[in-house]
Amino acid sequence: MIRTATAGSLPKPAWLAEPEKLWAQWQLQGDALEQAKRDAALIWIKEQEDAGLSTICEGEQFRIHFVHGILEHVAGIDWNVKTKMGIRNDRYVVDVPTVTSPVKRKYPIHKAEAEFTRAHTTRMVKFTMPGPMTICDTIADGHYGSRVDMAMAFADLLNEEARDLEAAGADIVQFDEPAFNAFTAEAAEWGVAALERAKRGLKCKTAVHICYGYGIQANIDWKKTLGEQWRQYESFFPTLDASSIDQVSLEFANSKVPPELMRLLPNKDVMVGVIDVATNEIETPEDVARRIEAASAFVDPQRIIACTNCGMAPLPRHVAVGKLKALGAGARLAAGE
């Protein structure tokens, strides 16, 4: 058996939010919105189960954005004080809210959503959150004076949230750190340490998802500048392998990541991206099986978790469903089932 999972996000139905957009605003309000979020989560739980995936998530149906979905529930952030800031090492420049005092959860943020997911599947449940470095690369610091200090403060906050998620029944808590690929030296110097701080005390499995970004134009254009080999992982995989994080996600499908870099993670379960999220073309099960087999030259198949390169939030809904089916069928094919 080859284990399977998605990176996290899945498209929101058109009746919940504007489709094929990362920052799509809600179509409903109040109680109707809350019910619609639950309905959307149920759809994706069922779609993942029907596709045969072994690990289930709620597809991030309860939040508009994977980072701001948690930040909007944090005290110490002034959403009216906007700072112009380069994101992912100036890949794009936007006006972002600003941290103006010590950050603190106002209340448990995603616990009820994790409980909802746990109540509606008997399979492994994964819940995703942004990692400390990626949060600090998405919001401006007007208080701490140091990105490292702010990251550690958010790591403490994430640890509180992760403990609640574990108590709610999450089998895996995943931290999303696309910023690692933009700040490779910093990822090794303090990014992994911040992850360790965010996961301390947890008994459930922990994962870190590190990709080259959603399949949006800014990321597609950035990838074109990275040359014939994408070796960013090489800088921090050894540090990650020495950490206590259990699972590491990487981009593989249609990427220029040298596959031998997976050998730098001999002590981890490896979430191998075998589904390309930067195209609407739906893979065949044979495509997926070939990618799993290629990865098995560098990772023991028992440590492989077949996964998507990144989240599928910007994709058309039918495309995401097709890719889920290909992922499940391809993993079964690769396992000889």
Image (tube, rainbow, N blue to C red):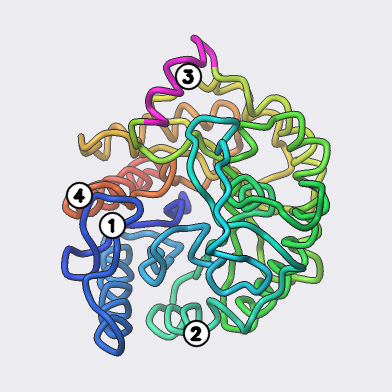
Residue 256 numbered mark, or none: 3
Q: How dense is the environment of label 3, judged by Cα within 10 Å: few (below 14), some, or many (20 and up)?
A: some
Q: How dense is the environment of label 4, judged by Cα within 10 Å: few (below 14), some, or many (20 and up)?
A: some
Query: Pointers 2 and 1 in contact (CB under 8 A)?
Result: no
Residue at the spot x=62%, y=48% of the render?
134
Q: Amino acid at mark 1?
A: Pro
Q: Amino acid at mark 4?
A: Pro
Q: Is residue 134 left or right of residue 2?
A: right
Q: Is residue 221 left or right of residue 39?
A: right
Q: Relative to 51, does residue 26 appear above or below in the rendering?
A: below
Q: Amino acid at mark 3?
A: Lys
Q: Which residue is disc 2 drawn over?
A: 112
Q: Which one is closest to the eye, mark 1 or mark 3? A: 1
Query: Pointers 1 and 3 in contact (CB under 8 A)?
Result: no
Q: Is residue 18 left or right of residue 63?
A: left
Range of magenta residues: 218-229
Q: Which residue is disc 4 drawn over?
A: 316
Q: Which residue is disc 1 drawn over?
A: 11
Between residue 275 and residue 159, name the one nearer to us.
Answer: 159
Give the SS element for disc 1: loop
Q: Amino acid at mark 2?
A: Ala
Give the SS element for disc 3: loop
Q: Quadrant of residue 261?
A: top right
